[in-house]
Image: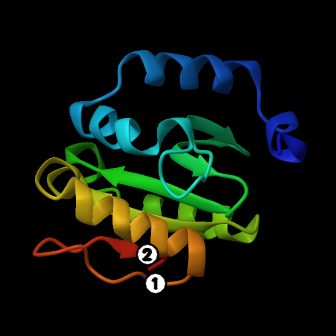
């Protein structure tokens, strides 16, 4: 479902996405190992996907689900992240957030929560001791 989202992005944004793929963080690589090749419930995810003016960590177009891993680079950027999330939701996507620590220490729980978000949408239950957030 390349659709209108891929047509809206600039070449610079596409190049940025490629670089982000090459320089993936450890939590991103771990989560990608679970999401790639339709391993999670048969859903196809793309990583570092350009959508509109943004590059999202992971996206399943079929389920209209975006997955974002928030690390240290997100500290102090809550207002920006909220505005970005609202714009993505305005395009029809739901945004699921987890932390680097979630991905590193509870990958199975995070994966299960993402699967539930894809299947049922909306807020998702916590995968364990560290909460992941679906569409705050």
Q: Which residue is mark 1?
A: 123
Mark 1 crowdedness (10 Å alpha carbons): few <14, some 14-19, many ≥20 = some
Q: Quadrant of the C terminus?
A: bottom left
Left or right position of 8 against 98: right
117 is higher (above) or lower (below) than 61 = below
From the viewer's perspective, is residue 114 above or below residue 54?
Answer: below
Do we see residue 121 in this rendering?
no
Residue shown at 56%/44% (left/top)? 38
Q: Quadrant of residue 78?
A: bottom left
Q: Which mark is residue 106?
A: none
- Residue receiving disc 2: 134
Q: Earlier in the sequence, mark 1 or mark 2?
A: 1
Image coordinates for residue 92, horizontal then vertical, percent? 74, 69
Residue 135 position, x and y percent, is 49, 76
**Secondary structure found at label 1:** loop
- The reply to whether dot 1 and dot 2 touch (C-beta < 8 Å) is yes
User: In x, y percent, where is residue 97?
Assistant: 38, 63
Q: Residue at x 35, y 26 (%)?
A: 24
Q: Secondary structure at mark 2?
A: strand
Q: CA distance from mark 1 to mark 2?
A: 4 Å
Residue in the picture at 34% in, 51% down: 69
Pinpoint residue 62: horizontal percent, then vertical percent.
73, 57
**By what rule are the colours in the image chosen?**
rainbow
Q: Nearer the viewer, residue 32 or 19?
A: 32
Which quarter of the picture shows residue 75? bottom left
Q: The N terminus is located in which quarter? A: top right
Quadrant location of residue 77? bottom left
């Amino acid at each position: 479902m390349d659709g209108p989202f891929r047509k809206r992005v600039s070449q610079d944004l596409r190049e940025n996405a490629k670089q982000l793929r090459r320089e993936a963080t450890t939590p991103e690589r771990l989560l990608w190992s679970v999401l790639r090749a339709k391993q999670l419930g048969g859903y196809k995810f793309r990583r570092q996907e350009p959508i509109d003016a943004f590059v999202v960590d992971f996206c399943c177009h079929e389920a209209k689900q975006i997955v974002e891993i928030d690390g240290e680079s997100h500290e102090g950027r809550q207002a920006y992240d909220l505005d970005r999330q609202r714009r993505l939701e305005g395009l029809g996507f739901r945004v699921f957030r987890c932390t680097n620590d979630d991905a590193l220490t509870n990958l199975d729980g995070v994966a299960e929560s993402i699967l539930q978000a894809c299947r049922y949408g909306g807020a998702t239950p916590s995968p364990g001791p560290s909460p992941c957030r679906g569409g705050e």
